Image (spheres, rainbow, N blue to C red):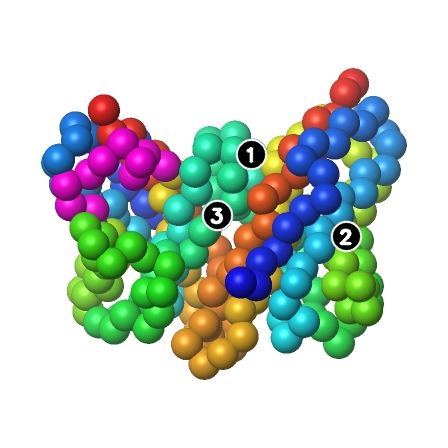
Amino acid sequence: NAGVMQNPRHLVRRRGQEARLRCSPMKGHSHVYWYRQLPEEGLKFMVYLQKENIIDESGMPKERFSAEFPKEGPSILRIQQVVRGDSAAYFCASSPQVANTEAFFGQGTRLTVV
Amino acid sequence: GESVGLHLPTLSVQEGDNSIINCAYSNSASDYFIWYKQESGKGPQFIIDIRSNMDKRQGQRVTVLLNKTVKHLSLQIAATQPGDSAVYFCAEKGAGETSGSRLTFGEGTQLTVNP
């Protein structure tokens, strides 16, 4: 049973480019969460999605950031016109249902903006 | 706003000793807490959890204590081993219908185990 899969593991983008981060939840999981971690800091919630729905995006910047979790395929976190401050590790977690509160994390995507 | 935070940023112990990592939380409505271990370059790994109707929960070599009166959480690791060296985060489950399993993380404690 594969865990939460994120790709790419490392991503380098120049300022102004777009970054696309992918997350495939664990098999049978329909809830996905994205978190951002700055160096030597804790994880900060960004967005919570279920299939085809954004449930809570209160932690995601209003501009340049978007997320989706289509009916088929992985969840995508998209960052447009990246800036140096976007450099961070982005983690995805999944859970099977709301009542099951333990979320399983992927290995993260480390985004570096140069 | 509500937050979860840690008392100490670093903790250094000798191999074989017991470790205690502390966490203070501010949301008295939180009903679920988790401790995660994060090794360098990896994602958070679940260690142990506890619900607000409990004061103590034990796992293999780990114990979590919850003091709701002072809103304090601690993680005790018995017979600490070099493989325990990592950053440890406490996390709080958000309340509310839309929060789902959304977690609020503390800033982390770096545990270093000296051989």
Residue B39, which numbered label? 1
Please say if the residues under marks 3 and 1 sit with CB atoms less than 8 Å apart: no
Where does residue B93 sit, x and y in percent of width and height?
A: 56, 66
Q: Residue B80, located in which quarter of the rendered image?
A: top right
Question: What's the CA distance linking mark 2 and mark 1?
Answer: 19 Å
> How many neighbours does mark 1 have within 10 angstroms: few (below 14), some (14-19), or many (20 or more)?
some
Which residue is disc 2 drawn over?
A: B74
Question: What's the CA distance linking mark 3 and mark 1?
Answer: 14 Å
Q: As displayed, is residue B13 above or below residue A33?
A: above
Q: Residue B15, located in which quarter of the rendered image?
A: top right
Q: Which structural element holds mark 3?
A: strand
User: Which amino acid lies under the numbered mark 2 shown in the image of this protein?
Assistant: Ser
Residue at 77% x, 52% y: name it. B74
- The lab-note entry on whether marks 3 and 2 share a chain reads no
Where does residue A75 sit, x and y in percent of width and height?
A: 25, 57
Residue B12, which numbered label? none
Q: Which structural element holds mark 1?
A: loop
Q: Earlier in the sequence, mark 2 or mark 1?
A: 1
Residue that extends furthest to the right in the rendered view of this protein: B17
Magenta-colored stretch includes residue A79: yes
Magenta-colored stretch includes residue B31: no
User: Where does the magenta region start and end?
Assistant: A78-88
> Disc 3 sits on a residue from what chain?
A
Q: Which structural element holds mark 2?
A: strand
User: Which amino acid lies under the numbered mark 3 shown in the image of this protein?
Assistant: Leu
Question: What's the CA distance linking mark 3 and mark 2?
Answer: 19 Å
Residue A43, which numbered label? 3
